[in-house]
Amino acid sequence: MKNLSLILNIVLLIAVGVLFFLHFSKDKPAGGTATSALEPGALQIAYIDSDTVLKYYEYLKVNKATLEGKTKQMEQDFRNRAQGLQNEIAAYQRNVSSMTLGQVRSTEEELGKKQQNLQMYQQSLSQALMEEEAKLNRELYTRVTEYLKKYGKDKGLQVVLKHDPTSDVLWANNALDISQDVITGLNSEYTAEKNGTTPKKDSVATK
């Protein structure tokens, strides 16, 4: 069903573009001034190209393919049920002239209920897909931001920004781009997870 594919595409595109923002919080006094203000030039900033990171993150590739497979199965199941109901309606239309008034009313009532049930089933499939997509988006966000926290701590960064056509970062020096490091580190952690091994403490990639 086209609606299910549309939902999948829209939701995946929305949440995989979420801001991957890291800022180590500092205790602030009542006046709102940081207790340990950074000197000019001391703020360490980096950025990732989110489109590139998501394109090459194996975790997203695998889980997106799984979700698309579930969507196709749901669509096929719905088409099969819809076709079955259509066949029943066609049979009714062929035989209605030979049916009694009571049979007509009974059959139409039954077909009406089946149509309502099919619509409810369609809604339940859409809801199930949305929940699956939301779960994937949450896990994706958590994985990336948790890795960036470790990476930032290891590299002495205070901020990691997202750079893509939708972000507020209009330009940034390529020297601040840590996308490849992040891709390597994320995939290393995912591979270790799949293999049932624990990533080493120094698994954060070195630029």
Image: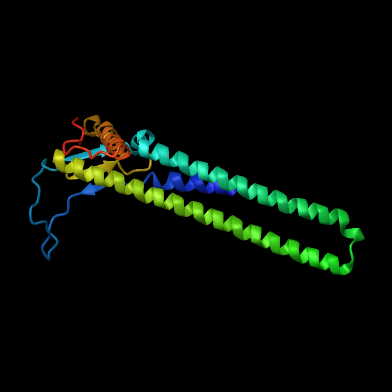
Quadrant that contains the C terminus: top left
Residue 20 visible to the viewer: no
Q: Nearer the viewer, residue 63 or 173?
A: 63
What residue is drawn where x is 84% and y is 66%?
103
In the picture provided, is 86 more to the left or to the right than 104?
Answer: left
Total numbered badges shown on the rendered structure: 0
What residue is drawn where x is 38% and y is 44%?
17
In the picture provided, is 8 more to the left or to the right than 136?
Answer: right
Residue 145: x and y in percent read: 27, 46
Residue 150 visible to the viewer: yes
Residue 158: x and y in percent read: 17, 45
Residue 193: x and y in percent read: 29, 40
Q: Quadrant of residue 162?
A: top left
Q: Is residue 207 above or below residue 141?
A: above
Q: Nearer the viewer, residue 93 or 194?
A: 194
Q: Quadrant of residue 189?
A: top left
What residue is drawn where x is 22% and y is 38%?
199
Extreme residue in the bottom direction? 102
Q: Is residue 83 above or below residue 196?
A: below
In the picture provided, is 198 more to the left or to the right than 51?
Answer: left
Q: Is residue 60 above or below residue 126?
A: above
Residue 185: x and y in percent read: 25, 35
Q: Nearer the viewer, residue 48 or 103?
A: 103
What residue is drawn where x is 39% and y is 44%?
16
